Amino acid sequence: MVLGTYKEIVSARATDKEIQNVSQDGGIVTGLLAYALDEKIIEGAVVAGPGEEFWKPEPMVAMTADEIIAAAGTKYTFSPNVMMLKKAVRQYGIEKLGTVAIPCQTMGIRKTQSYPFGVRFLADKIKLLVGIYCMENFPFASLQTFISEKMGIDPTLVEKMDIGKGKFWVYTQDDVFNIPLKETHGYEQDGCNVCLDYTCELADLATGSVGSPDGWSTVITRTEDGNSIFQQAVETGVFETKDMANVKPGLDLLEKLAAQKKDKNQKTIDKRKEMGLPVPY
Amino acid sequence: MSEKIVISPTSRQEGHAELVMEVDDEGIVTKGRYFSITPVRGLEKIVTGKAPETAPVITQRICGVCPIPHTLASVEAMDDSLDIEVPKAGRQLRELILAAHHVNSHAIHQFLIAADFVPENLMAAAINSVSEVRKTAQYVVDMVGGEGIHPSEIRIGGMADNISELARKKLYARLKQLKPKLDEHVDLIIGLVADKGLPEGLGVHNQPTLATHQIYGDRNEFDLERFTEIMPESWYDDPEVAKRACSTIPLYDGVNVEVGPRARAVEYKGFNERGVVAQHVARALEQKTALSRAITILDELDTSAPARADFDITGTNKLGVGAIEGPRGMDVHMAQVANGKTQFYSALVPTTWNIPTMGPATEGFHHEFGPHVIRAYDPCLSCATHVMVVDDEDRSIIKNEMVRL
């Protein structure tokens, strides 16, 4: 299946205005982690918090809903959250841990759960793994380069970044800028070209804007736990949902992009194999 | 007519050692010699010439049984050499992790001696008790040290991080819960050791005890001037033993000593029992002392305080001393740092102190009790080895050409 195994797919957004104001799209990650914290399903979460350099996130352990909300919004460069998981279950004393991860990180986390070398007593403590859709990710220097050099914007003025409609968007206080996504090609990290996972197929629940209208997100619940936590959150009114059949652009777009990533990168993998180059999995 | 009984290797201990006993016609030991046959590790040489931060990371690998004391002794030696004042929270966290380690490590030893003392019908209960004690104690080491075996959070200057308030509360609650359980466990162990009915006076010797602190260790209580070290060939009067022994013989005031739980109890708690039973009792009672100390620290710890000092690694070649009371005794690491690199490093470890005392302690009783005497010291050989075997054929360490590490 091009979208991986799943229980249900819906379009959703957080009902909390405070979350809507700071979130990238539907505020699913922020809303769900904050809900899980409030309900004591988790005791803390590793999230991509603000770093010292502007737009360069640093993984942080959030132990309150406020800290989760402070970390809302997509950062288009890596936040090595996996690195922080062990610290969260050690010095922070968290025994029920949530986190947010892109597909490659999710694969890493699932692998540490299967083979816990160097991460003893971590596997059983990860209670909620929220995945986000990811086509590719940019090293921080790449991001800086195409924002300041290609778009001519001082990165410190950037208020929000986004990818959508085939373009990379940058919002400043007064203006909106964009460049076609193909302008960013070659700036992504190399590993992204051999990754076949667009919709975070190993997460408890995966989300992203693709398939839903502006301000909404498409949520794919994948595991029993992911599904039940999300359903509880919907029932308590944390999220409002719409049937995927009734929203535009709809599931077709998500399937199309997921298939595109698989097809394109499978070709890269085959080519690399042909050349005798290593493929990471 | 004397006969020689050789136990090689002595069992249910860490590392390899040999016990050679000369016995008379009744089988009574007239001369006991205990010595290490564990191959040398050479870790002190590995860390020389490298950045000071390397030392705690490498030397904790001396052993997986007591990595905590080695890490602590190493950072303490570096702190001293670099003249670092460790912040209060850092000192508290270090002591907390060691106190928890004492509880855990003593429980492991109780498991190792279970076959000697526990009757079959109580074996399952005793092992479960050990497991339960260890589980909670190791939880503390995991949380505070980052890893239960080779802790990553113990750093030069203090600890990498303070723990969160959530962690402090959890640890406090769990250790409080462990207290009645541990009291029961200690009573069980002491009772079982008493029930065994070992002969009166077994393992008693007249050597002095050496300890620097009730739980943690204090470099000011270890006087380097009073310490000397001799080579095994000038200690063991049996040339066969002397040429194969892999550890040097440390002396304090010119004599061999005993270190460990009984030594600490004698020095700091007015304990005056001697011998095998006294060692087991002192070890078990020390678990209670350590747990109380851990609970007190968790009660007092300010989780918002800094746990680590800033420091400069350049160094002045000052000889830094780190003295830590490991479960098996005083563990001293010494380090000199200059130009940002470790110039000299030496570890003077618990069982090394005990080795020359352990053999003679078997004397005067039937040789069948020899292993009991040895196990009462909870010997741990891997860190004690400091001399290299240079001839594999006859396993000798050639006199005067010994490779000292």
Image (cartoon, rainbow, N blue to C red):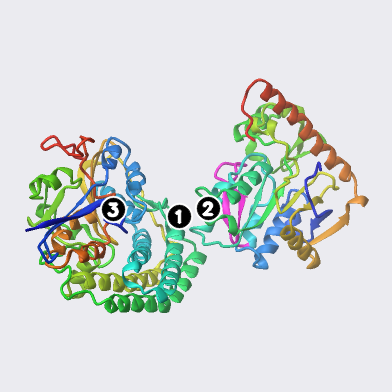
Q: Secondary structure at mark 1?
A: loop
Let me know if marks 1 and 2 both belong to one chain.
Answer: no
Residue ID for mark 3:
B73
Query: Foreground residue, A200 or B231?
Result: B231
Q: Earlier in the sequence, mark 3 or mark 1?
A: 3
Image x and y of residue A166, in percent: 81, 34
Residue ID for mark 2:
A86
Crowding around mark 2 (Cα neighbors within 10 Å: few <14, some 14 to 19, many 20+) is many
Q: Residue at x 47, y 67 (%)?
A: B168
Kind of residue at badge 3: Ala
Segment colored magenta:
A44-64
Determine if the magenta segment contains residue A59.
yes
Kind of residue at badge 1: Gly
Quadrant of the frame with the N terminus of chain B: bottom left
Determine if the magenta segment contains residue B161.
no
Mark 3 touching mark 1, by CB under 8 A? no
Query: Foreground residue, B298 or B213?
Result: B213
Examine the rendering and report whether any part of residue B322 can be seen.
no
